[in-house]
């Protein structure tokens, strides 16, 4: 007998508010991009960004490799609950992710891929390609975008976001922008942050730049 899909799940409004406030404070540029997605995709993107933020904090929370691995194992177990049929553990990001995972049919393996990518950072450099691609794939699934051009552009922006300034980052951003006439407009919420990887945008100018670029299908 085949496994039945997880039953719909609705997270508490307090969990969604926690996620929104967290991402707004910790990841302003990608938060702003997510606001251009319609609901419920917007909440899904914010939940993924909060998840990514928590994974990225592992190295700052503890410098002891064993404790870092224990922390990431906690997240693996939490994601298994989020992708399951029961009630997830009482943690606001997990709660919001459970709604996102079940609503959009995100695969547990894809969530674990992101955790595994961050685990490599415990005792070595982050593989920005692997981590950036893993998050981008999850975001594309939430947005319902499946075409190759959008995936390629999202991968490029996702990896570039994790890099410091330099020619390699510039090349990735340029590669993503070269695809703008081919990408699905639904992918724009995760591509717009590429605007912040170019010339500096002040806090007052940034929202207008994102809005204007979204209207023109640019990033």
Image (cartoon, helix red, strand yellow):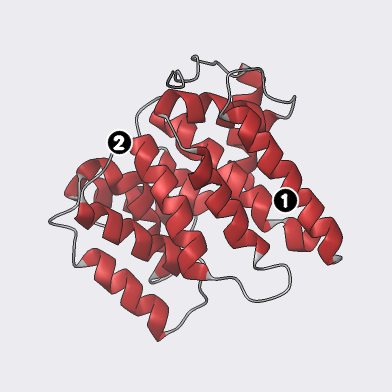
> Compared to 163, does 140 lie above or below?
above
- Going from N to C along the chain, the mark reached first, 1 or 2, is 1
Q: Nearer the viewer, residue 56 or 120?
A: 120
Q: Can see residue 59?
A: yes
Spatial CA span between label 1 and label 2: 28 Å
Local packing at callout 1 (Cα closer than 10 Å; few below 14, some 14-19, many 20+) is: some
In the image, 66: left or right of 189? right
The x, y position of residue 94, in whole percent, is: 65, 32
Q: Quadrant of the C terminus?
A: bottom left
Q: Nearer the viewer, residue 77 or 15?
A: 77
Q: Which residue is mark 1?
A: 72
> Compared to 215, does 155 lie above or below?
below
Q: Find numbered disc 1 in the image and state the secondary structure of the residue it sits on.
A: helix
Q: Quadrant of the N terminus?
A: top left
In the image, 56: left or right of 206? right
Q: Residue at x 52, y 76 (%)?
A: 164
The x, y position of residue 153, in whole percent, is: 28, 60
In the image, 181: left or right of 49? left
Q: Residue at x 78, y 50 (%)?
A: 71
Quadrant assignment, res 90: top right
Quadrant assignment, res 170: bottom left
Q: Which mark is residue 8?
A: none
Local packing at callout 2 (Cα closer than 10 Å; few below 14, some 14-19, many 20+) is: some
In the image, 154: left or right of 132? left
Q: Residue furthest front?
A: 1
Of discs 1 and 2, which sits in the foreground?
1
Q: Which mark is residue 144?
A: 2
């Amino acid at each position: 007998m085949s496994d039945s899909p997880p039953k719909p799940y609705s997270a508490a409004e307090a969990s969604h508010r926690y996620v929104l406030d967290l991402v707004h404070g910790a990841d302003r540029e990608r938060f702003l991009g997510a606001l251009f997605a319609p609901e419920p995709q917007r909440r899904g993107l914010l939940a993924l960004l909060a998840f990514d933020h928590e994974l990225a904090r592992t190295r700052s929370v503890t410098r002891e490799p064993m404790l870092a691995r224990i922390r990431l194992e906690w997240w693996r177990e939490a994601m298994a609950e989020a992708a399951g049929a029961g009630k997830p553990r009482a943690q606001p990001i997990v709660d919001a992710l459970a709604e996102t995972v079940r609503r959009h049919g995100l695969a547990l393996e894809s969530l674990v891929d992101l955790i595994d990518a961050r685990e490599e950072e415990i005792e070595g450099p982050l593989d920005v390609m692997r981590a950036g691609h893993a998050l981008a794939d999850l975001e594309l699934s939430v947005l319902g975008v499946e075409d190759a051009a959008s995936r390629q552009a999202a991968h490029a922006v996702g990896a570039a976001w994790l890099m410091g300034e330099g020619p390699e980052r510039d090349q990735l951003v340029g590669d993503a922008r070269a695809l703008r006439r081919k990408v699905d407009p639904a992918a724009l919420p995760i591509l717009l942050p590429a605007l912040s990887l170019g010339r500096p945008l002040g806090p007052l100018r940034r929202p207008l730049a994102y809005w204007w670029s979204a209207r023109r299908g640019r990033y």
